[in-house]
Amino acid sequence: FGMDAFFPTAKIYNPKGQNYLSVDRDLVLAYKESPAGQLIHPGINEAGAVAAFTAAGTAYATHGVPLVPVYVFYSMFGFQRTGDAFWAAADQMTRGFIIGATAGRTTLTGEGLQHADGHSPLLASTNPAVVTYDPAYGYEMGHIIRDGLERMYGPDSTDKNLMYYLTVYNEPIVQPAEPDELDVEGVIKGIYLLAPAKIDGPRTQILASGVSVPWAIEAQRILAEDWSVSADVWSVTSWNELRRDGLAAEEEAFLNPGEPARVPFITQQLEGATGPVVAVSDYMKAVPDQIRQFVPNEFATLGADGFGFSDTRAAARRYFKNDTHSIVVKALQMLAARGEVEEGAPSYALDRYKLLDVNAGTTGGAGGDA
């Protein structure tokens, strides 16, 4: 995970210190253990790792020492293998951050299908204490982590006993600077307009999360240049939180009949956003489908259902049909059904982009190999 940069300064925790000479001792980033180490290195021992996370995350109560543990693991092997331990952590009012690294079903294709995570956000959604995010950019993570710290330990917080689950990917992508007028509320609540359409024409809305956001940006360009279609791109930082907000709004309306009903945040954000919605992620379609009932527009999802696919990232995304060209074809299909583009446009696009050929996929090389 690139955490070796922390070894010389933060050091790896060992109550007995380091009693050997590491083979990399002459390197700048040498392996160093210490009784004062801040990195707990349990190895492939998920149960022990969650136990350590829980111990640190409850130290504010058991020892009067507020700690903020950050537990990093392969996202497939967190809630999948130790979901009961995370439930116990919630019971014990654990606070901290859980980082599901190597996230997504098509992003880590080289280590075998069992590593291909397509559903951890769904498993995380079953835990009431877990706040789940699938950010695309570093500036989004900065605001999310700040919000998490404020909610866990801020003086004005009324719901402190939370664990933040952030899914991150091992695929390098271009990291833009934070926009000057960033919708920070949207980042925290789950969705904000990232890239407004640049042309006039038949309109569509593309909702994307995590590693799929650059695919949506590229689809926006292709729709404009090849089809004169106008597409807005939204970064969905949390499908889960959008659903929770929608369900909470429904519950409030249910228990307060006769009073004006609160409009869910996702519905507010898309108010005035015309055209069909294409929602895409590197997870099962059920992940973006969580918000379907709260979206006022026609709604379709693209995702990666089934087991993983051992090939290149581009081939895997073409296989699952959640890549850039799949977004384009799906948008054209929905617009054609509305009579806003030519009836034959989807079929022509499917053939033009060779959507049925996994070897024709091109989505996945934007940031190089890793």
Image (cartoon, rainbow, N blue to C red):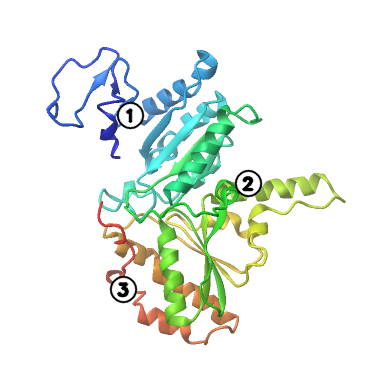
Which residue corresponds to the image point at 53% horizontal and 70% vertical from the top-left?
197
Per the image, label 1 sits on a secondary structure element best described as: loop
- Dot 2 amino acid type: Arg
Crowd band around label 2 with a 10 angstrom C-alpha radius: few (<14), some (14–19), many (20+)? some
Kindly identify the amino acid type of the residue bearing the numbered disc 1: Asn
> Looking at the image, which residue is at 27% across and 34% down?
5
- Residue 162: x, y in percent? 56, 32
Q: Residue at x 18, y 15 (%)?
A: 19
**Callout count:** 3
Which of the two marks, 3 or 2, is nearer to us in this view? 2
Q: Nearer the viewer, mark 2 or mark 1?
A: 2
Of label 3 and label 2, which has the lower sequence position? Answer: 2
Instruction: Please say if 241 is above or below 129.
Output: below
**Tag shown at residue 71:** none
Question: How far across and down, in percent of the image, does residue 359 sit?
Answer: 27, 70
Report which residue position mark 1 lands on.
Answer: 45
Q: Which residue corresponds to mark 2? A: 244
Q: State the residue position of label 3.
A: 357
Mark found first going from the N terminus, 2 or 1: 1
Q: x, y percentage for residue 39?
A: 33, 26
Name of the residue lying farthest toward the front: 180
- Packing grade of label 1 (10 A; few <14, some 14-19, many >=20) is few
Question: Of callouts 1 and 3, which one flags the residue occurring earlier in the amino acid sequence?
Answer: 1
The reply to whether the C-beta atoms of the residues labelled 2 and 1 are less than 8 Å apart is: no
Whether residue 61 is visible to the viewer of this picture, yes or no, is yes
